[in-house]
C-alpha cells in the first residue's frame, strides 16, 4: 500500500495525536508511572507510526536531492504541529 503524505493527511495525523495522547498518558503514564514498556509501545503505535506514515511517508521523493531542503516535508511537519496545537487549544477551551 503506497501512502502519499499530503498537508491534509499530516493535519489529520496531528489531530489524532492530540486527541489520543491524553488517553495514552492517562492509561500508561501519569506522574506515578515509571514510564514503562507499555507507554513506549503505545506512543510508537499511536503517535510515531501515524506521524511517520502520514507526514514523512515511506517512499523517498525523487525530486529532492541531497543538497536541497524538502520544503514540502517542512510544510507537512508544520501542518502536523499546527493541527495538534489547535486541537489541544480547542480541547482546553471546551474543557474536555
Image (spheres, grey):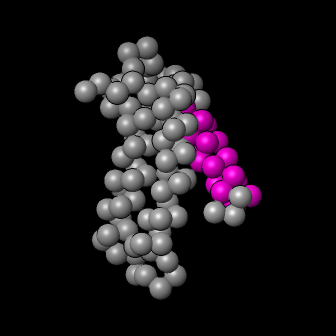
- The quarter of the picture where residue 38 lies is bottom left
Above or below: residue 5 compared with residue 78: above
Disc tally is 0
Q: Quadrant of the N terminus?
A: top left
Image-based side of 51 in relation to 90, left or right: left
- Does residue 69 show up? no
Residue 92 in magenta stretch: yes
Where does residue 87 sit, x and y in percent of width and height? Answer: 63, 49
Above or below: residue 10 compared with residue 70: below
Prevailing secondary structure of the magenta residues: helix
Q: Which one is nearer the viewer's eye here, 63 or 7? A: 7
Which residue is situated farthest in the top direction here? 63
Where does residue 26 sit, x and y in percent of width and height? Answer: 48, 72
Kindly identify the residue that appears in the image at 37 percent across and 68 percent down: 39
Above or below: residue 27 compared with residue 67: below
Where does residue 35 sit, x and y in percent of width and height? Answer: 40, 75
Image-based side of 66 in relation to 15, left or right: left
Which residue is situated farthest in the right direction here? 93
Q: Quadrant of the C terminus?
A: bottom right
Q: What's the magenta region?
A: 76-93
Kindly identify the residue that appears in the image at 47 percent across and 85 percent down: 32
- Does residue 26 show up? yes
Kindly identify the residue that appears in the image at 57 percent across and 25 percent down: 71
Q: Which one is nearer the viewer's eye here, 91 or 39? A: 91
Kindly identify the residue that appears in the image at 42 percent across and 35 percent down: 54
- The quarter of the picture where residue 3 lies is top left
Where does residue 82 sit, x and y in percent of width and height? Answer: 64, 42
Which residue is situated farthest in the left direction here? 1
Above or below: residue 90 compared with residue 36: above
Image-based side of 53 in relation to 18, left or right: left
Amino acid at each position: 500500500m503506497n501512502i502519499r503524505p499530503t498537508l491534509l493527511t499530516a493535519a489529520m495525523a496531528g489531530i489524532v495525536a492530540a486527541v489520543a495522547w491524553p488517553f495514552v498518558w492517562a492509561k500508561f503514564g501519569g506522574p506515578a508511572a515509571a514510564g514503562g514498556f507499555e507507554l513506549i509501545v503505545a506512543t510508537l503505535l499511536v503517535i510515531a507510526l501515524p506521524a511517520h506514515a502520514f507526514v514523512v511517508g515511506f517512499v523517498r521523493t525523487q525530486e529532492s536531492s541531497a543538497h536541497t531542503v524538502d520544503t514540502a516535508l517542512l510544510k507537512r511537519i508544520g501542518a502536523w504541529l499546527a493541527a495538534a496545537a489547535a486541537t489541544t487549544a480547542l480541547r482546553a477551551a471546551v474543557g474536555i
